[in-house]
Image: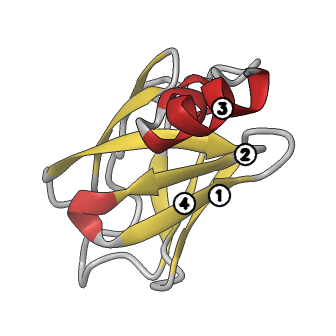
Amino acid sequence: MKCMFLAVAASFGVCSAAFAQTVPSWNAGGQDWRCSQKCREGLAGRPTPIAQTGRDFILTNEAGQTASGIYEEGYKIRVPDWNATAIFSDDLKTLTFYPYGTVWAR
């Protein structure tokens, strides 16, 4: 019976939804982020603030465009609006966007 329950729960996404609710133990939010590498032409050094609430992020690029991000695992967030994955350094001082190679630093 237990196996049947798990199979039914998994088919409805109950197990995966619980796993997806993981919240990072760190907070990278702040106004001190700036675009440092592979920025849009003429916009290097412009502010790129990050707002973080739990596992949800609001990112603003050097051109002032915003996008939502969601924590995945480790130091990785997914940014669907920009078709990117972003990975923070262990010390939370840089954020690199893949596949573009743009780097934000604080």
Instruction: Indicate which disc, 2 or 1, sits on the residue closer to the N terminus.
Output: 2
Could you tell whether 54 is left or right of 64 in the image? right
Mark 4–mark 2 Cα distance, whole angstroms, equals 8 Å
Residue designated by label 3: 4
Element on which disc 1 rests? strand
> Could you say which is closer to the camera, residue 24 or residue 47?
24
* Mark 1 crowd level (few <14, some 14–19, many ≥20, 10 Å Cα): many
Give, as a three-letter code, the residue at label 4.
Ala
Residue under the point 65% across and 58% down: 87
* Mark 4 crowd level (few <14, some 14–19, many ≥20, 10 Å Cα): many
- Determine contact: label 4, label 1, CB under 8 Å: yes
Q: Can residue 18 be seen in this view?
A: yes
Residue 44 locus on image (x, y percent):
37, 69
Residue 106 locus on image (x, y percent):
61, 42
Instruction: Indicate which disc, 1 or 3, sits on the residue closer to the N terminus.
Output: 3
Quarter assignment of residue 7 = top right
Please tell me whether mark 1 or mark 3 is closer to you in this view: 3
Element on which disc 4 rests? strand
Q: Residue 87 carries which label?
A: 1
Residue designated by label 4: 86
Residue designated by label 2: 75
- Determine contact: label 2, label 1, CB under 8 Å: yes
Mark 1–mark 3 Cα distance, whole angstroms, equals 38 Å
Give, as a three-letter code, the residue at label 3.
Met
Element on which disc 2 rests? loop
Mark 2–mark 1 Cα distance, whole angstroms, equals 6 Å
Residue under the point 60% across and 45% down: 72
